[in-house]
Image (spheres, grey):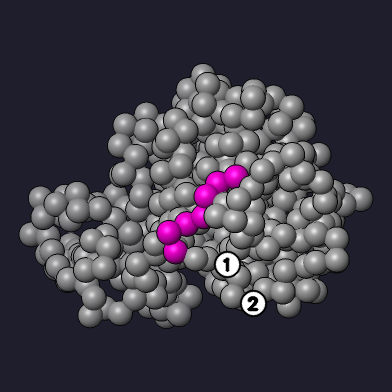
Amino acid sequence: MMKDLSVFLTPIAADLFAEIAVSKSQLGKQIDYHTEGNFPDGDDVKIAIIGVEEDRYSSDNKGCAKGADFVRQQLAQHFAFDYPISIADLGNIAAGEKVEDTYVALKTICQELIKDEIIPVIIGGSQDLTFANYIAYEKLEQTVNLVTVDPILSFSSFNKPIDSNTFLNNIILHQPNYLFNYSNIGNQRPYVDKELYELMNKMFFDNYRLGDAANDISSIEPVVRNADLLSFDIAAIKRSDAPGCKSSGPNGFSAQQACQLSRYAGMSDKLSSVGFYEFNPESDIHGITAALVAEMIWYLIDGVINRKKDYPIGDFKDYQKFIVSLSDQSHQITFYKSHLSNRWWMDVPYPAGQKNRYQRHHLVPCTYEDYQQATDEEVPDRWWKAYQKLT
């Protein structure tokens, strides 16, 4: 099937790695690249890298369409992993005649890869490409959880045309609707209208501000673990650590935290696609941001290699079960702790007649602290929001 995708993709330039010395133990010798006359056949491929040369709907970061090849050069120099994994680089999607043509190409590629259980790793390009990634799930007939790492909330309370700052409008309003939950990590209050926070709360979406997330990055792991699709805006990283983004600011996640979030994503057995957007080589200094995005992808893949095969693909015999009954008898919450990974989930009951539609979402990733909160007679916020969406 991957051969059929070649019509949407341009090969990597033959001289891209000409000035880079790469040994056999580095990824440049181990990734199967789409070059002139060679397209990866897809056998045993687990990760497929795709560059997208599209930034016409970027609101303030023109030039980010050129980022993918700079990241490739850096990634090729990273050493391979402790355990083997088959990685293909499918080349670039050139900008179509219209932006919507680019969307169709990316949607089609992601749809086929996800169906074949290959994780597409998208290097943008502007973040509105997340919409194309999202609609790839339409024919898979499953509801999905979307997580963005973004210093703003990329939607508007007004009816504005799609761009990199409003693409969530198109996702939320898209029909058929198969978005179960949306979570944003790292937004910064000076950049977000109060009305958007209120709108997030009304829709029972999750909002994790930068200060809370950065102060305890491990508390964000369950949020990332719950994602089917992760969209990472490089502007969420502080400018001193990632200068290659025209819309980044003085505050944001550190480079180390960005890599940690990427590894959390890779380790989730639920995650099936991911995109890194808004890296702009025109603004970069000494290749720092290209190197960071490559490192984030390295940690993402390392996370995939170290998946524990627990929920949603594990067997419940590998879990320890805890039942907490609140004294007012309003709710009984069942918690599960994986013996394989020591990670926690909590059970949210199905609504009548909705078991098949929401089956993938009734176990909500959580922390030990959520369990402690329940034993203290408080309903965890994660559980309550999921319950409201299910009912």
What range of the chain is rendered magenta?
Answer: 77-83
Q: Is residue 80 rendered magenta in the image?
A: yes
Residue underneath mark 2: 43
Q: In the rendered image of this protein, does residue 389 appear above or below residue 70?
A: below
For the C terminus, the quadrant is bottom left
Task: Decide which of tag 1 and tag 2 comes sooner along the chain.
Answer: 2
Between the residue at mark 1 and the residue at mark 2, the CA separation in whole angstroms equals 9 Å
Residues under numbered marks 1 and 2 in contact, where contact means CB atoms less than 8 Å apart:
yes
Q: Using the rendered image of the protein, determine whether residue 130 is visible from the camera's viewpoint.
A: no
- Give the amino acid at mark 1: Ser
Q: Which residue appears at 52% of the width and 21% of the height?
A: 240
Under circle 1, the secondary element is: loop
Q: Residue furthest left?
A: 327
Residue 199, given in percent of the width and then of the height, sits at 50, 41
Q: Which residue appears at 76% of the width and 61% of the height?
A: 34
In terms of secondary structure, what is the magenta stretch mainly? loop
Using residue 103 as the reference point, say whether residue 208 is left or right of it. Answer: left
Under circle 2, the secondary element is: loop
Q: Which residue appears at 11% of the width and 55% of the height?
A: 375
Residue underneath mark 1: 86
